[in-house]
């Protein structure tokens, strides 16, 4: 499955759509990196960089979304926040040791980009979609 933005993910709230697109792009960048990986080279720094960016941008996006939901008095705020927290923990749990060795790096980044993309698209399509009426 290609890790690209799909118009179904569009919620019609421009700031949020832009942030979602950026997150999907970062998954795509991770996926692209997996394809560039050549034997005998060390991609430790590249992987750390993209992972750090994904983490940072995810936290920013979740904080933004949560502030809008709070402002709008969204009823499912707590459940939604829990899903966000779960995802941040999932990213934080990734251990640098998992991609320390060059021979582990291709599979690590390929798997990571796919898992993140699946989680994100599912979250946008199922969970984020539910707040659209309240936030608009
Ligand atoms: Fe979101
Ligand atoms: Fe969300």
Image: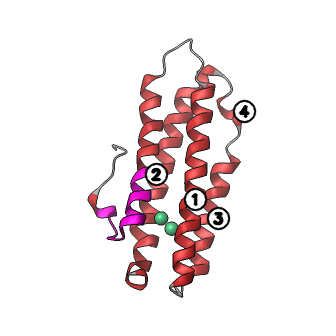
Q: Please give left or right for residue 76 compared with residue 86 in the image.
A: left
Q: Residue at position x 46%, y 44% from top? A: 26
Local secondary structure at mark 2: helix
Camera-nearest label, 2 or 3: 2
Where in the figure is residue 49, as x and y percent of width and height? Answer: 59, 35
Give the quadrant of the N terminus. top left
Does 91 sit above or below residue 72?
above
Query: Ligand 2: does it lie within 8 Å of the C-beta at label 4?
Result: no
CB contact under 8 Å: marks 4 and 3: no
Does label 3 or label 1 sit earlier along the sequence?
1
- Residue stretch rendered in magenta on the structure: 8-23
Q: Residue at position x 45%, y 71% from top? A: 128
Q: Mark 1 highlights which residue?
A: 60
Q: Please give left or right for residue 125 compared with residue 91 in the image.
A: left
Does label 4 or label 3 sit earlier along the sequence?
3
Where in the figure is residue 34, as x and y percent of width and height? Answer: 47, 29
């Amino acid at each position: 499955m290609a890790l690209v933005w799909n118009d179904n993910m569009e919620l019609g709230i421009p700031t949020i759509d832009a942030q979602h697109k950026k997150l999907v792009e970062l998954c795509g960048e991770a996926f692209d990196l997996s394809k560039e990986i050549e034997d005998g080279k060390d991609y430790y720094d590249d992987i750390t960089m993209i992972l750090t960016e994904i983490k940072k941008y995810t936290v920013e996006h979740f904080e933004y979304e949560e502030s809008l939901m709070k402002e709008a008095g969204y009823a499912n705020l707590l459940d939604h926040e829990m899903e966000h927290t779960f995802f941040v923990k999932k990213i934080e749990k990734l251990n640098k040791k998992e991609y320390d060795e060059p021979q582990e790096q291709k599979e690590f980044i390929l798997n990571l980009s796919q898992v993140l993309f699946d989680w994100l698209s599912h979250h946008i399509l199922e969970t984020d979609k539910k707040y659209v009426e309240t936030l608009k």
